[in-house]
């Protein structure tokens, strides 16, 4: 499989990265080169093999359902590019 | 006075305890060396006051931990409270965490101070440190009779350069697909990636969560054991943290390998690798035999599929992890004139991420997208299972595996421009990452141009001890004492 300009433009949109036509042009052969290379995995017979889910066998732990954190609003907002009235501020969403 | 920057961590610790010198003297020696090392571009932030404060606590007897009086360099991937943490990325410039990563908190609890933050490939994506927003780190090493600037490797390139240049006695690194081991090999130092889950990932900027592991880099195997003991440990804040006691790796160090079987994987014998590297590998086998071990040929049949598997899984996880950089909660925000929320996301990420990070996000987004997920991502996870199974079977016949660390010595800045050629740097390192196994690089010797080459040891799950012990056996026999001439 190889990707077209149109597909790369679509991927950039899904990834939320603004890209010029020139950048798309440059990326298409790069991505195709990498994708062509990873396609060698198609040779590997994986029938009957489950996808690996956890690399070191362990069970997910459960913890007691109690509050362990919180009340740190100012800390959470401390690095926000823009915070107002104790909230993250973003460009207007609803006209 | 003796040059304290020439000493190992074990020597600094023991000398401080014996009152041969004070922690302040150690910190001041290193602070001065750091301040005079700008040409290397290894540090992104210098924190001399932090190192001095920890020294003061050690000298006054307030801190008595195993690392009391030892200042360390910290890779810029670790969140450090109040100190810029940027993962080498423009998108995080100015980010000052309000919390401390578990690993660095553990090191502080043990008494360590911080010399500063260390440069790295952006989001740990790279093998040469060239993808950093701060520009590449220069290796203290140079080819014989040459002034060409060489890479210290990556992604923990600042970390590796700092130890080799003696501007930190030890450092933290992280390893997703070789990022501790390849730079350690390039700079003639030791570095170990422990079993996945030994070190908490909490507070480490995420790249590929199923692969990311922190580990130490230092001058010697013993120093790595000391640092790893302080870094590791169960952390309820990381769901993949192993709930196991931390072994006493340093106390149990032994280079007597009697009864141990060393696996030599035939698939790692690649003709295109320089003859010097395969010759060093053969020498390494002899050293381990001399230490009492028995070499056995093993087979890891899916080795050649490890890199392509990695370059599906790691970008997939990265594309998901890096979705958090949205210009809302922290880091950069760029909004085009009159732009809406979506335009803000796209512009912020376009301006904030570098070319390699964008490339990997794009690959990751593609392999996870509707219609391609099974063909790429699920397939790669199945092959990952086969690679894990190769190691499981191999460790029925051996106790530790010996290979070269990297397929070349350090190369020049700007010499490798093809992304795919760059990825091949980790051909020997990636399989152990995919299998979550502990692995270490130890310096073995110099190549014909006078550059360090590393030997690579892979252990079974949770068996860091055998990796360290085999590393020690090589270290004792290699007698690697070469140091870069100071030009910076």
Image (cartoon, coloured by chain):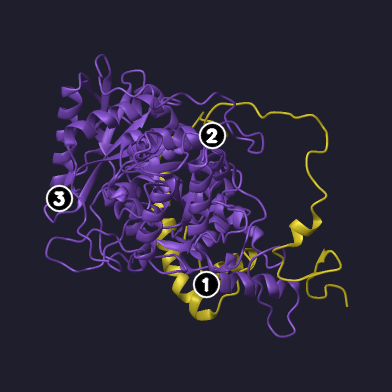
Chain colours: A yellow, B purple
Q: Which residue lies under the disc numbered 1?
A: A5
> Label 1 neighbourhood size at 10 Å, few (<14), some (14-19), many (20+)?
some
Q: Nearer the viewer, residue A21 or B322?
A: B322
Q: In the image, is B473 to the left or to the right of A71?
A: left
Q: In the image, is A50 to the left or to the right of B393?
A: right
Q: Which residue lies under the disc numbered 2?
A: B197
**Residue B132 position in % (x across, y down):** 45, 65
Q: Residue extending furthest top? A: B259
The reply to whether discs 2 and 1 touch (Cβ–Cβ < 8 Å) is no
**Residue B452 position in % (x across, y down):** 21, 49
At numbered mark 3, what does the secondary structure look like: helix, strand or loop?
Answer: loop
Note whether A47 is above or below B170 in the view shown.
above
Q: Mark 1 lies on which chain?
A: A
Q: Earlier in the sequence, mark 2 or mark 3?
A: 2
Note whether B306 is above or below B342 in the view shown.
above
Q: In which quarter of the image is residue A87?
A: bottom right
**Residue B374 position in % (x across, y down):** 57, 45
Note whether B214 is above or below B298 in the view shown.
below
Cα distance between the residues tagged 3 and 1: 44 Å
């Amino acid at each position: 499989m190889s990707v077209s300009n149109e597909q790369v433009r679509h991927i950039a949109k899904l990834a939320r990265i603004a890209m010029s036509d020139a950048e798309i042009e440059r990326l298409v052969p790069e991505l195709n080169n990498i994708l062509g290379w990873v396609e060698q995995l198609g040779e590997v017979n994986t029938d009957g093999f489950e996808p690996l889910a956890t690399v070191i066998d362990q069970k997910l732990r459960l913890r007691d359902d109690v509050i362990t954190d919180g009340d740190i609003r100012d800390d959470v907002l401390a690095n926000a590019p823009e915070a107002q009235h104790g909230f993250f501020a973003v460009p207007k969403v609803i006209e | 006075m003796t040059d304290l920057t020439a000493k190992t961590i074990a020597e600094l610790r023991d000398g401080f305890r014996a009152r041969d010198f004070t922690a302040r003297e150690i910190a001041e020696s290193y602070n001065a060396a750091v301040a005079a090392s700008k040409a290397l571009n290894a540090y992104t932030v210098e924190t001399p006051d932090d190192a001095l404060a920890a020294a003061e606590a050690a000298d006054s007897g307030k801190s008595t931990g195993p690392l009391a009086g030892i200042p360390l360099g910290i890779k810029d991937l670790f969140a450090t409270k109040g100190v810029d943490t940027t993962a080498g990325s423009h998108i995080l410039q100015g980010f000052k965490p309000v919390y401390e990563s578990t690993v660095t908190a553990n090191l502080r609890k043990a008494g360590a101070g911080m010399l500063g933050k260390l440069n790295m490939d952006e989001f740990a994506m790279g093998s040469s440190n060239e993808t950093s927003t701060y520009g590449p780190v220069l290796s203290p090493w140079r080819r014989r009779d040459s002034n060409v600037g060489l890479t210290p490797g990556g992604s923990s390139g600042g970390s590796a350069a700092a130890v080799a240049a003696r501007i930190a006695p030890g450092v933290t690194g992280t390893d997703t697909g070789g990022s501790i081991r390849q730079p350690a090999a390039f700079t003639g130092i030791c570095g170990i990636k422990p079993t996945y889950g030994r070190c908490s990932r909490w507070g480490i900027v995420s790249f590929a969560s199923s692969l990311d592991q922190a580990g130490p880099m230092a001058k010697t195997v013993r120093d790595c054991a000391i640092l790893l003991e302080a870094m590791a440990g169960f952390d309820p804040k990381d769901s993949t943290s192993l709930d196991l006691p931390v072994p006493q790796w340093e106390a149990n160090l032994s280079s007597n390998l009697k009864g141990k079987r060393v696996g030599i994987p035939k698939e790692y014998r690649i003709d295109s690798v320089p003859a010097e590297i395969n010759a060093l590998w053969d020498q390494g086998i002899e050293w381990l035999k001399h230490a009492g071990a028995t070499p056995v040929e093993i087979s890891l049949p899916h080795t050649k599929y490890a890199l392509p598997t990695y370059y599906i899984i790691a970008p997939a996880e990265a594309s998901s992890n890096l979705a958090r950089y949205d210009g809302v909660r922290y880091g950069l925000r760029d909004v085009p004139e009159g732009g809406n929320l979506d335009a803000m996301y796209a512009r912020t990420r376009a301006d904030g991420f570098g070319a390699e990070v964008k490339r990997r996000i794009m690959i990751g987004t593609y392999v996870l997208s509707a219609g391609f997920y099974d063909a790429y991502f699920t397939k790669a996870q199945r092959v990952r299972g086969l690679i894990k199974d190769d190691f499981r079977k191999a460790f029925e016949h051996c106790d530790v595996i010996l290979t070269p660390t990297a397929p070349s010595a350090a190369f020049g800045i700007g010499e490798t421009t093809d992304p795919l050629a760059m990825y091949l740097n980790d051909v020997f390192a990636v399989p152990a990452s995919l299998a979550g196994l502990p692995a270490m690089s130890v310096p073995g010797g110099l190549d014909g141009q006078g550059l360090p080459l590393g030997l690579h040891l892979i252990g079974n799950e949770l068996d860091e001890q055998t990796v360290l012990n085999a590393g020690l056996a090589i270290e004792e026999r290699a007698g690697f004492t070469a140091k870069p001439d100071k030009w910076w």
